[in-house]
Amino acid sequence: MTTGAFMNNKDTNPHESNTTGSSPETEVSNGIVPAHYLFPFILVTSLFALWGFANDITNPMVKAFKDIFQIDNAQSSMVQFAFYGGYGLMAIPAALVLRKLSYKSGILIGLLLYVIGALLFIPATLSMQFMMILIAYFILTCGLAFLETAANPYILSMGPPETATQRLNLCQAFNPMGSLTGMAVASYFILPNLLTQQFRGNEMEAHPEYATMAPAERDGLLNGALKSFSENSVEKFQEMQVADLATIRMPYVILALVVLAVLVLFLVSKLPNTGDSANKIELGALVKKLCTARYIGGVIAQAFYVGAQIMCWTFIIHYGVTLCGLTAASAQNHNIAAMVIFLSSRFICTFLMRFINPALLMTILASLAAVLVYFTLTLQNMTGLYCLVATSACMSLCFPTIYGIALDGLTPEDAKLGSAGLIMAIVGGAIMPQLQGALMDAKGGSWIENMVAPIQNSLSPEGDPTGTSFVLPFLCFLIVALYGLINIRFTSKTA
């Protein structure tokens, strides 16, 4: 049995367009992407970059909104809760729409919601209401849920089932290209131009003694100075807020225009229908197919993997600023380095899966990620930051490989609904960062602190809460490694 090898019914589906006029035997090649699917493959692959941009321009905003609105880590992590919460709410409705209509219809709906969510940043930032910003993120992500629920199984169905997981890994390689663009926009056009960040720089210049302090102590003093300024110079701080929110607003307006252009391109393009939505779904039979350890375990593993990924990337800035004494913009450059490593590793892993069992490769890399995060939470210095960056090399193949293993054996139509659970699992990216933010705040008494305190104390008893909070991604990577280990015998090296 091969990973992600659900049945491709292109030869029997009367609804699929065939523009080549060639026979089925010549259409299905041994390549990853058959020639007659090349244009739709490229078009759908562009979506992976679009949601990558949205994901990774958002991560640095957690720290930015923390300073702009003077809120704590747990509250600022609501950005991620709203962003990834849209996946949890919309994944199943998106799958039902796909089953009723088509992949193309789901993509069009997703792009429309994407545009609406991005445009909502105009009234949200003008009103200076954090809740409205969260709503804008939520609606934007409802669109991403449609896009991911449609695009992932659509790509899997565009060619031989034996190369389905390789095909999805190839597409996913373009996701970090969008992510890198989002990170670059945040690093070079947003963070350096925020007046709240410039205030911190001015405080450093005004207090040379800060340079000799431990990074955590210095960061605490800078946070205190900004808070004092917001309370004692209310009008001036509000002017800073207005300027900073305008800086954040502009990239989202430009993003809305870009996504609108992609929406028009999809609207006028003819795409093949690789599933037969005319057949009635056998819900009972589908539920039986999904009630397997491989599928349910895949949903669980995906939730923990996405949680680990978002925690590592979101809190690189916090780690760099608090424990290494970096500026937010400088710490964001380490995030960019992480994404470059992630992108490179994805192409390498796609190649290696020609020779190595995908589940085995994922087990090895997830285990290595856990080791690297262990050093991140115990060292709590620049070496720890480098280890945190290096985890990106281990994360690159996890999402599509879990996806392929979990959907193994499903038809394209069943995969439309089966994929909903895996996309809904992205809600792990909403919950986990908020829990990590609560650990960073270290107010004491919360259930998450009580639950992980024994592990934290055993790994790093004297550590700063920002560093020891990485116990959560450490545990998440162990769970992903376990899922891969369990499924090694169900997958083949050619998947």
Image (tube, grey):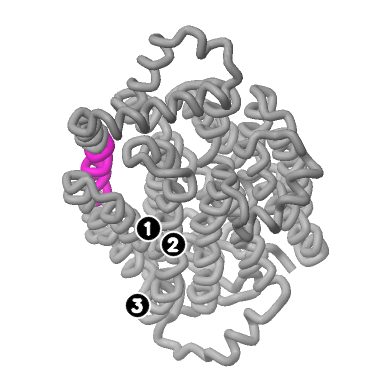
Query: Measuring 70% from the left and 34% from the top, which residue is drawn there?
Result: 463
- Residue 432 placement: quadrant: bottom right
Q: Position of residue 317 (x, y in %)?
A: 51, 32
Q: Which mark is residue 472?
A: none
Q: Which mark is residue 141?
A: 1
Q: Residue at x 59, y 45 (%)?
A: 442
Q: Amino acid at mark 2?
A: Gly
Residue 329 position, x and y percent, is 43, 24
How would you rate the neighbour count of disc 1 (Cα within 10 Å): few for under 14, some for 14-19, many for 20 or more? many
* SS class, disc 1: helix
Q: Is residue 58 above or below residue 134?
A: above
Viewer can see residue 465: yes
Q: Main secondary structure of the magenta part?
A: helix
Tell which tag, 2 or 3, sits nearer the viewer: 2
* Label annotation for residue 101: 3
Q: Magenta span covers which residues?
A: 247-259
**Numbered circle sitting on residue 85:** 2
Residue at 37% x, 81% y is 100
- Residue 204 in the image: x percent, y percent? 43, 14
Q: Earlier in the sequence, mark 3 or mark 1?
A: 3
Numbered disc 2: secondary structure: helix
Q: CA distance from mark 3 to mark 1?
A: 21 Å
Q: Amino acid at mark 3?
A: Leu
Residue 271 is left or right of residue 431, and the answer is left
Q: Residue 251 lies in magenta, yes or no?
A: yes
Q: What number of labels is visible?
A: 3
Disc 2 to disc 3, how far (Cα)?
24 Å
Q: Residues within 10 Å of mark 2 (few under 14, many from 20)?
A: many
Q: CA distance from mark 2 to mark 1?
A: 8 Å
- Verify CB contact (< 8 Å) between mark 2 and mark 1: yes
